[in-house]
Image (spheres, helix red, strand yellow):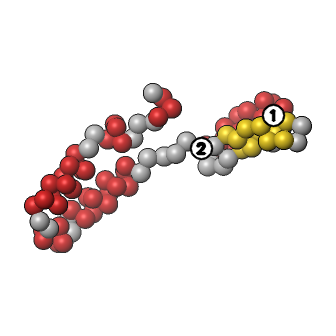
Amino acid sequence: MTATEASRNFRRVLNLVEAGESVALTRYGETIATIVPTPRSNADAVRSMLDDWHASPEAAAIDDEFAERVAAVRAKDSAELDRDPWLD
């Protein structure tokens, strides 16, 4: 997409990026920039996996040290895991 097209259709550019697309901006046929989606945290997926595992019969068979490590991961502050580095 040319820089001129992007400036005239910036809402479309943002919608594409929000949908997971990368948008290359060109000027005089040369790519000058690429707008890419912000990486997303997988903290919710990790918490869900740990919840599922913790509820399983195998969870009762683990040793104490491993159980402490799992508990530490579960207790990790979700605000830290989910923070957006662009907002700092």
Q: Residues within 10 Å of mark 2 (few under 14, many from 20)?
A: some
Residue ranking furthest to the top: 88
Is residue 24 toward the left or the right of residue 47 in the image?
A: right
Residue ranking furthest to the left: 64
Q: Residue 28: x, y in percent?
A: 89, 37
Q: Identify the amino acid type marked 2.
A: Pro
Q: Residue 85: x, y in percent?
A: 47, 34
The residue shown at (81%, 34%) is 3
The label number, if any, that marks residue 51 in the structure image: none
Q: Residues within 10 Å of mark 1 (few under 14, many from 20)?
A: some
**Residue 46 in view in this figure:** yes
Can you tell which quarter of the image residue 10 is in?
Answer: top right
Q: Earlier in the sequence, mark 1 or mark 2?
A: 1
Q: Which residue is mark 1?
A: 3
Nearest to the observer: residue 63 or residue 47: 63
The C terminus: image quadrant: top left
The label number, if any, that marks residue 37 in the structure image: 2
The N terminus: image quadrant: top right
Count of numbered marks: 2
Q: Is residue 73 above or below residue 52?
A: above
**The residue tagged with tag 1: helix, strand or loop?**
helix
Nearest to the observer: residue 1 or residue 18: 1
Give the CA distance from mark 1 to mark 2. 18 Å
**Residue 12 in view in this figure:** no
Is residue 33 toward the left or the right of residue 20 in the image?
A: right
> Marks 2 and 1: in contact by CB < 8 Å?
no
Can you tell which quarter of the image residue 48 is in?
Answer: bottom left
